[in-house]
Amino acid sequence: MTRTATRLSLVILVVAGGLQACRKKPEPAPEPVAAAPVSDGGAAQRRADSLAALAAQRRADSLAAARSAATANEEGAQAALRRVLAQVVYFDFDKDNLRDDARAVLDAKASVLAANAGITVVVTGHTDEQGTSEYNLALGQRRAAQVKRYLESKGIAENRMTTQSMGDSQPAAQGSDEASYQLNRRAEFETRNASGALMRPRS
Amino acid sequence: MTIRRLLGALLLLSAPLAAQDTTRGVRIGLTYDPGSKPGVVVLPGRGTGADSIRAIIQRDLDFGDRVTAIVLDAQALGEASSAAAPNWAVLTKLGAAAAVQVTPTAAGLHLAVYDVVKQTTALIRDYPAPQMSDMRNWRAAVHGLSDDLEQSLTGTRGIAHTRVSFERGGRLWVVDSDGEQATPVTEPGSFQSSAWSPSGTTIAYNTITPPAKIMLLDLSAGRSRTLVTGGGVFISPTFTPDGASVVYSHGIEDGTDLYIADVSGGGGRKLSVGRGSDNIQPSFSPDGRRIAFMSARAGHPEIYTIDADGTNAEMLTALEISSGAYRSSPDWSPDARSVAFQARLAGTFQLMTINLRDRGMKQLTSDGQNTDPSWAPDGRHIVFVSNRSGARVLWVLDAETGRTRQLTRGDNARNPAWSPRLPSN
């Protein structure tokens, strides 16, 4: 950050010098009058003061910009962590076993949960509309339980997770086609005690 | 042959019943013969509401599928009953075995049944009924008369005075057997499926939103109470045939099993041992000794039976190995002969029955997707969900003839349960 500020100051000085040179060109030659001579040293001082103020302002602006960039980076990182916590996992028809894509999502989730021990999670199992709604309610519960067991195997304490099922009553997609069905066969995650800043997982 | 037997019976019993007879359910008819449906004309009555009564009864007889309700235009009706007595000649020409006339009275409904061949009055009976303004109960009284009439004509009581409960939009709805009076009976929520008590006065149902529950709705009081609740899911309640207990499915994180709870309270007791699989949708045999249910213990949904105490589990449907095999929603027929269920065939669900004597299976539907069968108390009709007309609505199937009719309007009806024959008001 210091290096950046120094570089900016140099740029400002160079620009300021250029400005000074530009101003000198159109300036008419001093008239040979006998009046009290105007001190060249006073004008130079004013210019120097002005340039110093400008440089200070630029420095302050640049520091603020740097701080803002850092904040944005942090906010981005926090958003990314929250996305990991909220990321949905998907299932095959009439199955509760975890596919490779679901395991990858849950591995990332387990890392964030491990770094943030205060967070608790509600896992909700959902199904598509195929089959009977009663069986789908049971199937959704099994999917949620399967997710919980996997996260437990990754070191997340059992008492940090609760499971529930909404069966086929809350579809994510409304269509009656395989693309919609795939989006609806899922487990969703609701986190609690996660309002503060999240710690990044150890790499 | 059938008509002759009917008329003989009508004639034999017409004399003692000619006076006002308040005895309900007296059998004066014949044993139903699926190959023949005697023709019946419902004559116009006189008085306020007579036309509505005639329309309701005519439709009830038609929906019962045991007699042919001969529908006449206004001119023919006028000819058939132009005089004080029925016009026997016209009725005979129309092929009617019997004619019926219902007249509203100050106290209720006055029924007259005529034997067309013998040209005599076969039955006179009076029924109490509320004022027409009390539409729901008034219609119930008319349906009750239709059921009595069908018993008199065929020997088998009708199912007009029954209702069907179902789920729509997270609410429990109830509709009359003829599709009228569709009414929500719970507030919006997360209701899923329901079952009627044997007396027809209470409906058990389950809710989804945690904490999930099995609830009991007292229909006359309009109030629900919690039977059991807790963590996990509570699914698919059904009453024991004596009405004293409810069997349902419950599970938290290790599959679901069947439980039984006394309606007076005290919590549930585990019946089935699913070892981590799902075991849901119990349906009792009429004698209460066995329970049909769906289990995924073999890896996918199949139909099983189990003794009422939870022992002797047995797969009822032969195990299907094919990918996507899925049989569920068993409902034991009231005549105890078969179990209706839904099966996934070539990617869509269809209704089937399995004969309990020889395990023979019969496919009942093929048009669209057809699910969630529930038998009517006559053991002949089945209410189910179908998208054959586009929207997902309730339909009624006559399992003997294959005849179908749409029961509800509006989309997204699910999980129908046909009531027992209901008590008169």
Image (spheres, coloured by chain):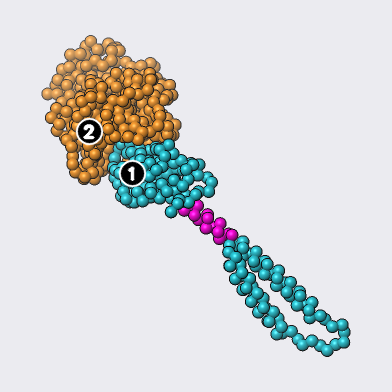
Chain colours: A cyan, B orange
Question: Residue at the spot x=38%, y=47% of the render?
Answer: A106
Q: Quadrant of the N terminus of chain B?
A: top left
Q: Position of residue B115 (x, y in %)?
A: 20, 20
Spatial separation of the CA atoms under disc 1 and disc 2: 21 Å
Q: Please identify the quarter of the rendering in which residue A3 is found.
A: bottom right
Front residue of B381 and B272: B272
Q: Count of labels shown?
A: 2
* Residue segment shown in magenta: A67-80
On screen, residue B71 versus residue A71, left or right, reads left
Residue displayed at 32% across by 34% down: B254
Q: Amino acid at mark 1?
A: Asp
Rendered residue at 84%/83% (across/down): A37
For the C terminus of chain B, the quadrant is top left
Q: Residues within 10 Å of mark 1 (few under 14, many from 20)?
A: many
- Residue A77 colored in magenta in the image: yes
**Left or right: B6, with B167 as reference point:** left
**Residue closest to the far bottom:** A32
Residue situated furthest right in the rendering = A35
Q: Is residue B94 left or right of residue A198?
A: left
Do we see residue A90 in this rendering? yes
Q: Which residue is mark 2?
A: B303
Residue found 20% across the figure and 20% down from its top: B155
Q: Is residue B44 visible?
A: no
Q: Nearer the viewer, residue B223 or A125?
A: A125
- Disc 1 element: loop
Q: Which residue is mark 1?
A: A128
Q: Residues within 10 Å of mark 2 (few under 14, many from 20)?
A: many
